Image (cartoon, rainbow, N blue to C red):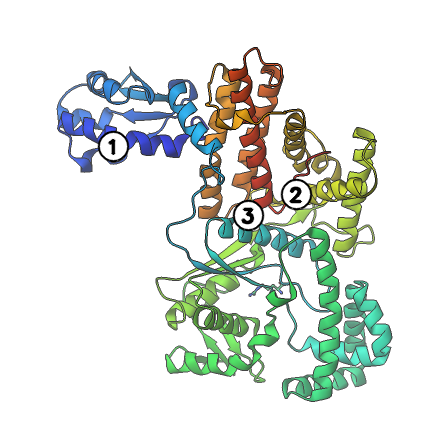
Amino acid sequence: MPGVDVMQILQQTVEPYFKEAMGTLGVQSSDYEKLLGLATVADHGDLAIACHSLSRILKKSPVDIGDELSSILKPLLDGIVEVNSLNGFVNLKATDGWIEKHCGIICNDARLGVNKSSISRTVAIDYSSPNVAKEMHVGHLRSTVIGDSLTRILEHLGHKVIRENHIGDWGTPFGMLIEHLLDLGEGDAGNELSVGDLDGFYKTARTKFDDDSAFADRSRSRVVLLQSGDKETLRLWQVLVDESTRYFNEVYQLLGVLLVDDDLMGESAYHHLLPNVVEHLDNKGLLKNSDGADVVFPGGHLNRDGEPLPLIVRKGDGGYNYATTDLACIIDRVQRLGANDLLYVVGTPQARHFEMVFAVAHQAGLLDDSNRAIHVNFGSVLGSDGKVLKSRSGSAVKLVDLLKEAVTRADEVIGEKNPNLVGKERQEIANAIGIGAVKYADLSTDRTRDYMFDWSKMLSFEGDTAPYLQYAHARIRSIFDKVESDSWHSSSLSIENDSERRLARSIIGFADAIQSAYVDLMPNRICIHLHQLSAAFGSFYENCPVLVAEKNEVRDSRLKLCDATARILSTGLGLLGIHAPDRM
Ligand code: ARG
């Protein structure tokens, strides 16, 4: 996209002069609102003003208006942009002077031009959210990694973030899980669960439930005991929860995400609120009876037969649903926690669930116009066969295994590239590269799409990968290892060639990339920018000698560009939850 890197700040600079010029021409503001925008042809400039719609008002040809406007703007924008009139368009291209000045401001700014939002919002973000006694699958990996990055981005912009790990820890399956726990003996069951053999545990319990009617009966009575708060049953339930969370924590630690035990707010935490939810919906006159169940019809959703689809909040047997819990969650997050925004980082298949829950919450007055409830949906992770990623045995891939493999593979790559790295440092770097590669492969794809899990692609030092960006960062750090004086700090920038120009423009564009990632909740916007920045740095490094530059001023200016580039890389990667080592 032409000009997109420096677009926003340049447009803000040009805007007042553009308005002045329109005033001089006698055009009303309502007639020129959207005329100044992004140039569509890179060679023509960064911004463009289309004059065609002014023709009717000024009764002149677009070409004449372009020429006239251009001669009014030229003196006003002197030093900011070059102004050219072509075929009814006025094209504006940032001058080197403007680039030097703005890039210089950003180089001197600890926040690299990324300002905190003027209004700080309280955001509850629901992510990771695996299920007790079930393997975390790659969908939970995506949720964890995307949620972690969004948390970091929001906090960086000055918002208050409340992390909610909404684990599935309640409901009818717990009857059979507890009975299976008793059959195995607590010690053995604990062992099985804590090493992460959660799927085996769950599947055996399920098979017993389906095949053994006595077991099924015991399980059903166990659910009743659990619901009624029986002490011993709750204790056994807690064993299941604790062993599973131990395993989840192992995954979180390997991943290096922000989630801690305090963020656990599972389904069980809302259990006591469920009767209130149903009562509230009833008081609002929203509750209907459908085949013995209590339901709400939010409208707008039809089933396969074209009939209105209800959101079931209490089943015929009195049991509550996933949806009831999510409504209770909304009450808790808005009323107790004071959240303005509610984000749910959950896979696309749950889109309808969230649409219906949000609609009911609005109708019931649990959410109002000041709240934003957003399903931050994401696609699937696919194996090389194009199908949802499975392990060789065909079961869900165990996340710890996957992450450990990432680190091992990264260690092999380091062994080839830089065998001098050893010991603890090598371990840390292998960790940063391996885990970084997995996270980046996930975050760099538009989250709403599926992506293919491909070890060799994600670990490559070339292309749109974490190691490529990390390597650019480490390369710059190694330049500074050889710099003795820090006189470059106070030097000013001078842009002399294309490589410097491209790098400086990319430095200016960092703030726009963060803003865009925030507005659309799309971490990949940061990846796109960091990749473009690293590529710009690559050609700069090839064409512009830094330490042996011909003049001191040139060397200092280049060092300044290098320093800002490295800081953007480590800050940007940091917002993705990826570490940027100084050496690799
Ligand atoms: N535990 C659910 C799952 O594994 C995800 C929960 C998402 N959060 C929520 N508030 N519904 O699919």
**Circle 3: element type:** loop
Residue at mark 2: 579
Q: Between residues 481 and 450, which one lies in front from this camera angle?
A: 481
Neighbour tally class for label 1: few under 14, some 14-19, many 20 plus, Cα within 10 Å:
few
Instruction: Tell me the distance, in whole angstroms, between the alpha carbons under discs 1 and 2.
Output: 41 Å
Q: In the rendered structure, find residue 474 and report the number of the disc placed on it.
A: none
Say whether residue 230 is visible: yes
Instruction: Tell me the distance, in whole angstroms, between the alpha carbons under discs 3 and 2.
Output: 25 Å
Q: Quadrant of residue 465?
A: top right
**Circle 1: element type:** helix
The residue mark sitting in front, 3 or 2, is 2
Looking at the picture, does residue 521 appear above or below residue 238? Answer: above
Which sits earlier in the primary sequence, circle 1 or circle 3?
Answer: 1
Q: What residue is shown at x 49% (from left), y 39% (from top)?
A: 110
Residue type at the position of mark 1: Pro
Residue at mark 1: 16
